[in-house]
Amino acid sequence: MTQDVKIHPLVSPWGRFGLYSFFVDAPEPAIVDTGIASSPAEGMAPALEALGRRIEDVRWILLTHGHIDHIGGAHALWELTGRRAQVVIHEADAHLLRSRRAHVDEYLAGRARYLHDPEGEAKQIAATDAVISGEMEPTMLVRGGETLSLGGDVTVSVHSIPGHTAGSVAYVVNGQNSVFVGDAVQVHGAANGFPGYEDPDAYRSSVQYLRDEIRPRHLYLGHPYRRADGVAYGVELDSEQAREALQQSLDVETRVEDAARHCLCHGLPETDSAYSPFALAADRLEYDGDPTLEPSPFFTTLHGYRTQFDQKS
């Protein structure tokens, strides 16, 4: 590649912070992650117009993982491209693109066990109906190891980085080492102040792989994740910030693992605590955030350690 491809963050309105996608200004333009149902029309289209680009010309929709705030706008964006764009997702998360119900089932199998919300399933159904623009079959499934051609001499390599979800991937613009990781690098978490990942062992290995093998020159995050002091990074990190964020992610995971093991070794007693049955872990970590605030990363992550603990016992 003779010169760097320009990358532009696209912010779509949602909640307090908005949602981030990224426009890769290649001969065959790509958008990485799609926000929710309203994001393509309300966020992406006007942002691209301001850049002198057209959403109709997007030819690649690259999904870093299957959570609703990343794939919710995929069908709507695909429609706006005249159904000409390739929609790419890892095969392990493809069910979340194909089916709204898959998101509800994921909730029921994991964090719902601890939230004890009698209206939880109904809330999840309402959320998926509201924010997912449509169920669809991806046009390209990946596993990691593929190289995608975005026209000219622009190529993107696909790397499997499971942990946050089973199908999390990194997209790397070759030659300039610009790396899109979605939510696979959690640092100290986002608004909830707690890192969220389903598979702790895979998360640790993936962050180490990014740090030691990929070594991003530019790292693009799905949300403004927070440093140890609570101050949020932006979503565009330079090489030094990337190294720091990756190392902090590993340091935090070590602390959370220690707290989880301490808690699990005491048999997970049920209490009146909002953190039950992981109250001992919350105390050890001095975590005082709201564990019920969706997407409830506290319970998602601790459930991941519980699952692995049970499997190894």
Image: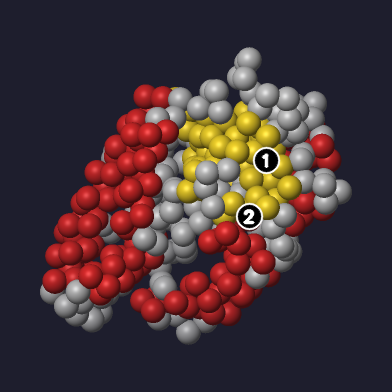
Snapshot quadrant of residue 100: bottom right
What SS does tag 2 mark? Answer: strand
- Residue 45's image quarter? top right
Which residue has dot 2 on it? 141
Residue 35 at x, y = what percent?
A: 63, 51
The 10 Å Cα crowd at callout 1, few under 14, some 14 to 19, many 20 or more, is many
Q: Which amino acid does label 1 sit on?
A: Ile
State whether residue 302 appears in this view: yes
The residue closer to the viewer here, 209 or 248, is 209
| Residue in the image at 71% along x and 28% along y | 26
Q: Which residue is drawn at 69% across and 46% down?
A: 61
Q: Where in the figure is residue 121, as x and y percent of width and height? A: 54, 79
* Residue 22, x across and y down, in percent: 62, 37
Q: Which colour scheme is used?
A: secondary structure
Identify which residue is drawn at 23% across, 70% down.
312
Q: Residue 188's spot in the image, x, y percent?
A: 34, 46
Q: What residue type is labelled 2?
A: Leu
Residue 27 horizontal side relative to residue 278, left or right: right
Callout count: 2
From the viewer's side, name the closer residue of 16 and 99: 99
Are circles 2 and 1 on residues that touch, CB within 8 Å?
A: no
Which residue lies under the disc numbered 1?
Answer: 31
Q: Which residue is drawn at 60% across and 38% down?
A: 147
The answer to whether residue 13 of the structure is visible from this angle is no
In three-dimensional space, the C-alpha distance between marks 2 and 1, rounded to whole angstroms, equals 16 Å
- The residue sitting at the right extreme is 82
Quadrant of the frame with the N terminus? top right
